[in-house]
Amino acid sequence: MRCSGILMPISSLPSPHGIGTLGAAAREFVDFLAAGGQTCWQLLPICPTSYGDSPYQSFSSYAGNPYFIDLDDLATDGLLRPEEYQSLPWGDDPRQVDYALLYRQRYPVLHLAANRLLARPPAEYASFCQASDWLENYALFMALKGKHGGASWFTWPEEERLRRRPAMAAAREELDGEIQFWKAVQFLFFRQWNALKTYANSAGVYIIGDLPIYVAGDSAEVWASPDQFQLDENGAPTEVSGCPPDGFAADGQLWGNPLFRWERMKEDGYQWWLRRIAFQFTIYDVLRIDHFRGFDAYYAIPAGEDTAHNGRWRPGPGSEFFRAVEAALGPKPIIAEDLGFLTDSVRELLRETGFPGMKVLELAFDHRDPAPGYLPHCYTPHCVAYTGTHDNDTIQGWMAQADPQDAAFAKAYLRLNRREGYHWGMMRAAWASPAGLAVMQAQDLLGLGSEARMNTPSTLGGNWIWRAQSGAFTPRLARRLRREMELYQRLPGQA
């Protein structure tokens, strides 16, 4: 069916206390989506952030981000007292997340809540711990990181780095209190997450999650399963992830994640991946898989390089991998992030899987690397249309900074005008297109400029910090959005 959604990170919600959370602001945003005729809420990864505060570099692809736990809801549950957190400084600018401040302030407060939970745990706590087969490794990993001052596990003593059995037993005994804390934090997160998802689904809003293809090197998954990754005998990566130089990045992109040992994964039928994807469908309704082209071929850069220049393409698992996924899990609603350098073999893999790919409207007008087929008249119903993603500028920002010939082309093709707002004209083109699903960035719905851009690839600092202002998603905006949905037949059940 034709439907529409909004891309809005949890971190960007206008919750109090420094960052968006799973509490009242999230429920209010669900109400806004439903009033605006939206069917989907697309998120960025909800896992804990690590290096660079990026949700695509996480300590775990299973765990939830502790910062997203709503403190007011904890107080309602009797696990916090308002005076324990409301008077604390949470940042001077409500338009931005201050991650350094959160790191200092959030965990002492969460310790208070966790201690009260563990003093009198509810019945479902034990069943949560038992059912979460990833939790033990994650909690031990985080406790050890705390013991070593947050240092990467690559720098830990050999017996802990390589998970020698006596060292693990000693760590579990020594760090039992911290291990229990990290388990309690995950229970609190997923209790709030499940409540929010139930609230959204009850309102007719479905959650689109985001699964990065790679995991961070400094993560519980790599530490606990080193045989699944291209590591040397000391646990250090031999080659790392990235993408080659192109019109947008002269040095390419050096992501730095360890690469998978696909041949080793194939031996047991990709069990590591099957567990990972199966888990995602316990928390999301639809899953967007990032960097889909990496399953066809991936770019491998020698570890220690400063740029991506000296990388080379290596074959990925191809369609055999996705056949294994479907055989084990059944057909699943997956969106393939098929952006970047595409080859005929990538297009064939997309066709074989049957997944809808992505069409990003801003890329259609960029002369540096024009994306064929990204103009709306080329779309088919079996795709997902975006004006931009978290890696693109906002529409208003793009129009202000684009090459004049690119901006002129967009204005002429889309019949854009400043009086209406360039953002409304470009969003309307996506909604009017044949694409079965059209997803807009929340920043574009609000008409914001480059100050609201979520991420600029290949840069550090200033990313992942944008937050919406309280009261931004008004009933008036919802009514206008709903009228557009009616016009382009994207209301639930309309077409």
Image (tube, helix red, strand yellow):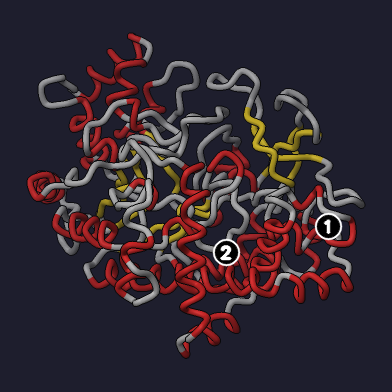
Q: Amino acid at mark 1?
A: Arg
Report the residue at 48% width, 66% height from top: 332
Q: Say if residue 477 shows up in the picture.
A: yes
Q: Tell me which corner region of the image, top left, top right, bottom left or bottom right, holds residue 358.
A: top left
Residue receiving disc 1: 161
**Residue 244 position in % (x across, y down):** 66, 28
Q: Is residue 207 left or right of residue 203?
A: right
In the rendered image, the vertical position of residue 142 relative to residue 299, given as above or below: below
Observer-nearest of 242 and 292: 242
**Residue 368 position in % (x across, y down):** 48, 17
| Element type at mark 1 | helix
- Asked if labels 2 and 1 touch by Cβ distance under 8 angstroms, the answer is no
Callout 2: few (<14), some (14-19), or many (20+) C-alpha neighbours within 10 Å?
A: many
In the rendered image, the vertical position of residue 433 relative to residue 59, given as above or below: above
Q: Say if residue 348 shows up in the picture.
A: no
Observer-nearest of 23 and 270: 23
Report the residue at 47% width, 44% height from top: 101
Observer-nearest of 407 and 225: 225
Q: Tell me which corner region of the image, top left, top right, bottom left or bottom right, holds residue 141.
A: bottom right
In the rendered image, the vertical position of residue 156 relative to residue 389, given as above or below: below
Residue receiving disc 2: 62
Report the residue at 51% width, 83% height from top: 119
Q: Amino acid at mark 2?
A: Tyr
Callout 1: few (<14), some (14-19), or many (20+) C-alpha neighbours within 10 Å?
A: some
